[in-house]
Image (cartoon, coloured by chain):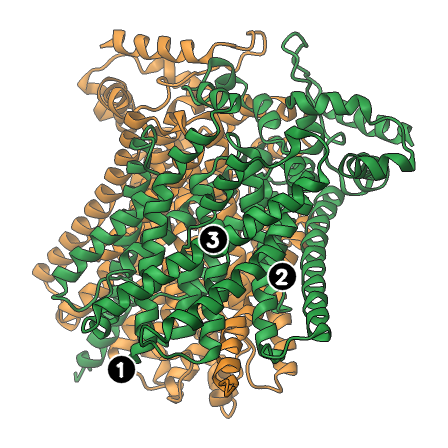
Chain colours: A green, B orange
Amino acid sequence: MGFDFGTMMETVNRLSTSDHTSVVSITVFVTLVCTCIVLGHLLEENRWMNESITALIIGVGTGVLILLVSGGKSSHLFVFSEDLFFIYLLPPIIFNAGFQVKKKQFFRNFMTIMLFGAVGTMISFTIISLGAIAFFQKLGVGLAIGDYLAIGAIFAATDSVCTFQVLNQDETPLLYSLVFGEGVVNDATSVVLFNAVQNFDLSHINTTVALQLIGNFIYLFISSLALGVLTGLLSAYIIKKLYFGRHSTDREVAIMMLMAYLSYMMAELFYLSGILTVFFCGIVMSHYTWYNVTENSRVTTKHTFASLSFVAETFIFLYVGMDALDIEKWRVVSDSPKTSISVSATLLGLILVGRAAFVLPLSFLSNLTKKHQHEKIDFKQQITIWWAGLMRGAVSMALAYNQFTRDGHTQLRGNAILITSTITVVLFSTVVFGLATKPLVRLLMPSSKQLDRMISSEPVTPRSFTVPLLGESQDSDADLFAETEHDPESREYDNILRPSSLRMLLTKPTRTVHYYWRKFDNTFMRPVFGGRGFVPYIPPSPTSPFEQNGHHHWQEEEKRGEDKH
Amino acid sequence: MGFDFGTMMETVNRLSTSDHTSVVSITVFVTLVCTCIVLGHLLEENRWMNESITALIIGVGTGVLILLVSGGKSSHLFVFSEDLFFIYLLPPIIFNAGFQVKKKQFFRNFMTIMLFGAVGTMISFTIISLGAIAFFQKLGVGLAIGDYLAIGAIFAATDSVCTFQVLNQDETPLLYSLVFGEGVVNDATSVVLFNAVQNFDLSHINTTVALQLIGNFIYLFISSLALGVLTGLLSAYIIKKLYFGRHSTDREVAIMMLMAYLSYMMAELFYLSGILTVFFCGIVMSHYTWYNVTENSRVTTKHTFASLSFVAETFIFLYVGMDALDIEKWRVVSDSPKTSISVSATLLGLILVGRAAFVLPLSFLSNLTKKHQHEKIDFKQQITIWWAGLMRGAVSMALAYNQFTRDGHTQLRGNAILITSTITVVLFSTVVFGLATKPLVRLLMPSSKQLDRMISSEPVTPRSFTVPLLGESQDSDADLFAETEHDPESREYDNILRPSSLRMLLTKPTRTVHYYWRKFDNTFMRPVFGGRGFVPYIPPSPTSPFEQNGHHHWQEEEKRGEDKH
């Protein structure tokens, strides 16, 4: 019996596990992410540390370990993959930001955010590009003009992922919405810049070219926004019409997750800004879709999106830390450490100057349009905005790898120096600027809001423990209506906002827009797409009895909504 | 100014999007998954269809479309990747099964499940292997002996993913726990079989080899189980000690997800059965960890795990349908369609016979140990168990690809025939056997439970709409305690189970084990690892007032638990 055991053993070997190295990598990586989460929890009370810095440090530490174990061969577990980053890790982070953003705060500052994100990024891009051209040739790093422009585009954009880590939406809502909003909008600017570099001869700028650039930006911005809004509305409509929850909460949760992801991928498909699209999809979903699903689905989606985003962030920082030590990149520049340090220092300087050059003038411009003193961005806030947007993170790193390497490392000296400099800038800005941001915010804005936050971060109170959903629907409600009840400032203007004259629009544009939007929303949008008021709303008053028949209540609410128009 | 625009445009092209084909694939795929979910919802009421068949049909339809669009070049969007399947899609499905399984039902039938999963799979393996050796050579398909044994191993194992689709845990709890439990246990058997084929000369089986095989199985089973249990307990301990929820629900959810995944990856790392490990990790997590987290985290984890599992299942069936039409595979066998059909028919016949050959005798054996008539598996149930375990799905397909191809297709005629036959068997068994299972279950077991189920699947009742958490913690509670209140049968034996004599162990082994397990659990395990009784428990009685101070209640419960010992 001549059994062919040789072939069999071979196939069995393959069968037992497909690729054992990837299993090892994933196991180590998941263990590290768990460690980061536990350590991040233990360091929660620390006033300096934050999760991203913990992850970075653990990443660097593991990198050193792998370097020692592998005998100096490599320091990371995976090769840095843009696909992994842009297709899997970035979308949940940005979607969650849109889903949880305080919408009123965001839209109230919409013009300022656009100013920072579009004009500001252009200014920063110009300064960093010109600065790089001026300094780098003196340092003996010769690059093509395309590389200089790419440096400008890479380092002009604020990393929106880093913003979460240092600014707290509840403590400093204005700063958060400005800096984070800028981070979202400047993604569109970056796409436009790259297209511009591709299609126009930027050495001969004239009015036509400038107008085309502006037109491009407007097209890209509007179509990305429209795609996000449409996907969000489609999800709201499908869920409202089919009422998935009747059969399965899991289907609702699955369809919300998948449609959100779909909006990002469609934007990428049409060469739009996926970040902008998925951000606005998140806003629309939190305004309509979220109210159409069952209570269980609401709790689930809210926390699932946040958890996924949290894991993705930790993953990114851990990876960046681990990748930083990759020996291949440093070997090429090891003969000229001075040049490398100078290039890094120059880049950091240019980032500092480039950001200051637009934050201060644009804040001044923005202040001109505001009447009330409390609406203006004061100098302390301007400093904080400048500082909080200095960090460069995984987005910069991914773009730098894309521009200056193939397969993760390069043999060209100029490119190698730029890669190591990018790593230095990312590590330095995240750790040093990041560490200093929390204390700076505490120093410059000792507001009452911060005190409120400190009280509310106490251990879970009995009430929120037993009736989490009641509390939930209030907390999570970053809705235009809900905030009216929370924000003492806005209650006053709820009363003012009754007349609907043209004079209003001229004197108080934001408020009037808000008023008409609410009217439009209640009359046309909510009856079709659902949303708050078409689902059982339990008033937060502690004296009201617990509504038992939510289903009937829901129908009454719908009727009431129909009576209005 | 000699700007190097050529290089720049090239780099810009690369920057704009990393790999556009993968973006297109993902977009189409996500859209299809959404379509499947919506259609699955619309077909919910249909007594024949289920989600997996919908996904398969849509997959085949899309395959035809892609085939037409690409001019007959390919029918799928991705190349079938075992990594994708075994590393990313399978773990959430099996973990969720462990997390949601009715634990009492599962452990009560533990011996029968082990009998089916271990001995039954061996019987089926022997019959299919011997049958293949006998018939295939007559059909002119010459294979190595290793390939025949591999065929036995591939087709002997029930696909645990398919089981969810046709058997309902609430309608037919006994059948579900038997067939699904068998599917989990036979994964360990498969690993042992492959190792055995690798290390022993199976042509000369003697007592030593048989004992070694049994020893191997016991080692693998116990170590996989221990790894899963330990990871689960570790997660419970970490969350109880650190009390993540005080700071962030997201951290709790993230750590539960990551530790569950970690258990699977560690099992793969140590060449154990990942399926067994992650299944028991799910059981332990639902018994301890789930009770240590906040109410929000409970709702979130329960539905997130279910949704992820649901999406992964849909993904798998969609993919299998799409891949089935891949033209490369069919081209090689197109000259001998008769042989291909004969091979497929032979395989289907062997599966039918192989399964009947162990279900009937082993059920008889299992019945011998049971005293009461209602505990025994009657003939109708045996038929259903036989029928419901006939489906072969993505696991079979992944193993067949692994064994008979490299890079997704093969030029060897024998291998090509086996691949196409596997696809035929998978499609036929899933569609035909799958379609017939629901009606068969209805025909053979018109039990009262099924009627209950039909009533409870009515649109959400008011109570469950407004107080979902109260309802939730009851429903989801696949816990030993909770079911005592639901199951009228078990209430009676709660009263019987007071004396603790040795006679008990001999006459009613399962019940006695259960009694001592509960004692051990309450005295030693729960004080350390948390779990029910160490978190606020709200009694299901409708007359009791809604507990307002859950935090105090929780502490009382803990005290009470401490008083007991």
Identity of the amino acid at label 3? Asp
Viewport quadrant of the C terminus of chain A: top right
Q: Looking at the rendering, which quadrant does residue A12 occupy? A: bottom left
Q: Do discs 3 and 1 share a chain?
A: no
Left or right of A45, for residue B44: right
Instruction: Identify the mark at residue A159; answer none if there is no mark.
Output: 3
Label 3 and label 1: CA atoms lie apart by 58 Å
Label 3 Cα neighbours within 10 Å, binned few <14 / some 14-19 / many ≥20: many
Tag 1 subunit: B
Disc 1 marks which residue?
A: B144
Q: Is residue B244 above or below residue B400?
A: above
Identity of the amino acid at label 2? Thr
Q: Looking at the rendering, which quadrant does residue A73 occupy? A: bottom left
Q: Give the residue at x 31% y 8%.
A: B559
Disc 2 marks which residue?
A: B31
Label 1 and label 2: CA atoms lie apart by 42 Å
Place of residue B32 in the rendered image (x, y in percent of width and height, measured from the top left): 62, 62
Find numbered disc 1 in the image and state the secondary structure of the residue it sits on.
loop
Q: Is residue A138 above or below residue B43?
A: below
Find numbered disc 3 in the image and state the secondary structure of the residue it sits on.
loop
Viewport quadrant of the N terminus of chain A: bottom left
Left or right of B112, for residue B68: right
Tag 3 subunit: A
Q: Say which of B167 and B120 sits in front.
A: B167
Q: Give the residue at x 47% y 20%.
A: A451
Of badges 3 and 1, nearer the viewer stands 3
Place of residue B25 in the rendered image (x, y in percent of width and height, measured from the top left): 55, 70
Label 3 and label 2: CA atoms lie apart by 30 Å
| Residue A458 visible, this orientation | yes
Identity of the amino acid at label 1? Ala
Place of residue A96 in the rendered image (x, y in percent of width and height, measured from the top left): 54, 45
Place of residue B288 in the rendered image (x, y in percent of width and height, measured from the top left): 33, 29
